[in-house]
Amino acid sequence: MRKLDEIGICPNCDCSISIFKTQNYKRFAKCEICGMSYALPKRGSINNSALICPRNNFPLLIVDRKDQCAYFWTDGPCFNCVKYDNCETVKELITEFTELQVYGY
């Protein structure tokens, strides 16, 4: 298991959450202090948006894949969230990406 990058602050213990990659190329985010972890997508580049999900307080990540619009991820894909259509944070990011013409928007 290899540590790749720090992405934010753990909502449970206020320590840092880091991205780890296993030998079989699975990626996950994990807090090294309290052990809280969740899966990340196996494919695509992961970038930190420096924003926090208003529902669960996890860092909001941008997953960028070739030939596809980027999508957002916290402890799962944001488009699966019940509050996705009304999420101000996601709307703000999509508006910004559309104006800058980045990440396929």
Image: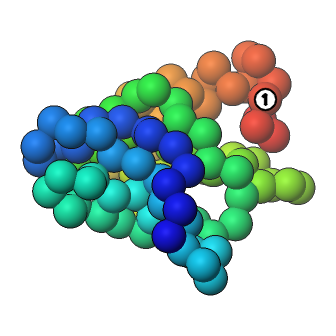
Name the residue at the front extreme. 2
Question: In the rendered view of the protein, which quadrant contains the C terminus?
Answer: top right
Can residue 77 be seen from the camera position used here? no
Q: Is residue 57 above or below residue 71?
A: above
Q: Residue 46: x, y in percent?
A: 62, 48
Left/right placement of residue 31 relative to residue 71 reads left
Name the residue at the right extreme. 67
The image quadrant of residue 100 is top right
Q: Could you say which is closer to the camera, residue 23 or residue 42?
A: 23
The image quadrant of residue 39 is bottom left
Q: Residue 65: x, y in percent?
A: 77, 55
Q: Is residue 53 above or below residue 71?
A: above
Say which residue appears at 85% left-offset and 55% top-offset. 66
Left/right placement of residue 91 relative to residue 17 reads right
Name the residue at the left extreme. 13
The image quadrant of residue 44 is bottom right
Label tally: 1
Q: Amino acid at mark 1?
A: Val
Q: Residue 20: x, y in percent?
A: 48, 60
Q: Is residue 72 above or below residue 29?
A: above
Q: Could you say which is closer to the camera, residue 89 or residue 40?
A: 40
Q: Secondary structure at mark 1?
A: loop
Can residue 39 be seen from the camera position used here? yes
Left/right placement of residue 53 relative to residue 63 reads left
Left/right placement of residue 92 relative to residue 56 reads right
Say which residue appears at 63% left-offset and 20% top-offset. 96
Q: Which residue is mark 1?
A: 102
Say which residue appears at 70% left-offset and 51% top-offset. 45
